[in-house]
Amino acid sequence: MAKQRDIYLQAMAVDNSLPIDPDAVDLWARDLDNPLRWSVMPWLRLFLAVFLHLTWAFKRMSPIQFSAHGYLQFMICWFCKHFVSPEGNRLILRHFATESNILNFLIDNTKPGLEPLKLYPSMLADLMTNTFVDHDQELFRVFRDLGSWDPSEWPKPHSELKWDHWREIDVKYDTSHKKWTQVLDFETGHVLFMCMFCLFLTREEYRGAINGFNLDQSMALRIAKMVDDPSIIEMAYNKYPMYLLGPWNLTQRFLMHGFFTEHLNARLEQIRQQQAA
């Protein structure tokens, strides 16, 4: 007999006050049911937070900077394939697509000549070319090349919005097949990889990677004005891009960034569907 979810998760599963794809809700609810998240992850977070800060201090003070993007990416893909739950892996792949959609929406409607994002991996193997490093660098490229924001041109009728490079989420990774070693939930997997990211990126790359989340507020402010929906601003947990942060509370900020892109992608998809209808 299948285990019944506790009543909070049942309530969460049907609450659509914030727009979100039902696939993402189901994946997250299943991931939260993982007992290791509640028994192992808190201890790992405590231990690895100390190790992360020591690694961060070493990278910040070292006069010699080094990086190993290929090795880092190989280790992430290998680890996810063998140890992270299928639900966690699918959530990772979805995040690439949701953020690419949001940035492409900004490009299409504010600077159409800009090179669009092409980071839409559908399988774990795709992450070897659609890398996490590229994911961060493309975000910064888009904001740099979009230039200053002029809100005076907005809002416009939804019928005038452009969706030239928007894609429906097409993740082909199958969660029905699971290796016996794939026991780690999404959050525990991230906790385990924090130190590797810090070690195998240069200090500038890592500083950008852990502060790029704060551009969520900028995306929310722009798109809220464009589509005339102030509620979008409330979706952004990470804020104030001028205030650079260290690695403290990194996993929570990373998760809230993922939720933000899921919610905003779903809201824009609602608008796109309404426009198409």
Image (spheres, grey):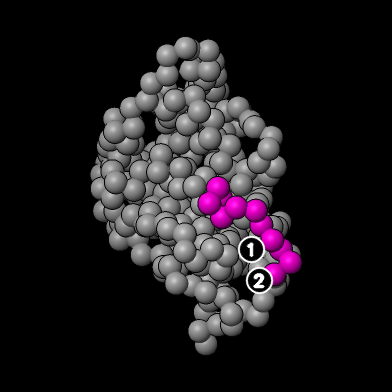
Residues rendered magenta in the picture: 143-153
Residue at (58, 60) in percent of width and height? 263
Q: Kindly identify which residue carries mark 2.
A: 227
CA–CA distance between discs 1 and 2?
6 Å
Q: Residue at x 44, y 25 (%)?
A: 202
Label placed on residue 223 = 1
Residue 129 at x, y percent in the picture: 29, 46
Quadrant hosting residue 186: top left
Above or below, comparing residue 4 to residue 179 in the picture: below
Mark 1 in CB contact with mark 2 (< 8 angstroms): yes
- Where disc 1 sits, the SS reads helix
Please state which amino acid type lies under the numbered disc 1.
Answer: Ile
Of 177 and 75, nearer the camera is 75
Predominant SS along the magenta part: helix
x then y, percent, for residue 99: 49, 55
| Residue 192 visible in the picture | no
Q: Is residue 9 positioned above or below 44 on the image? A: below
Residue 214: mark in rendering:
none
The quarter of the picture where residue 71 lies is: top left
Circle 2 SS class: helix
Amino acid type of disc 2? Val
State yes or no: residue 250 in magenta.
no
Instruction: Name which residue lies at 52% across and 74% down.
Output: 162
- On screen, residue 192 above or below 104: above
> In the rendering, at what x and y percent does residue 149 appear?
66, 57
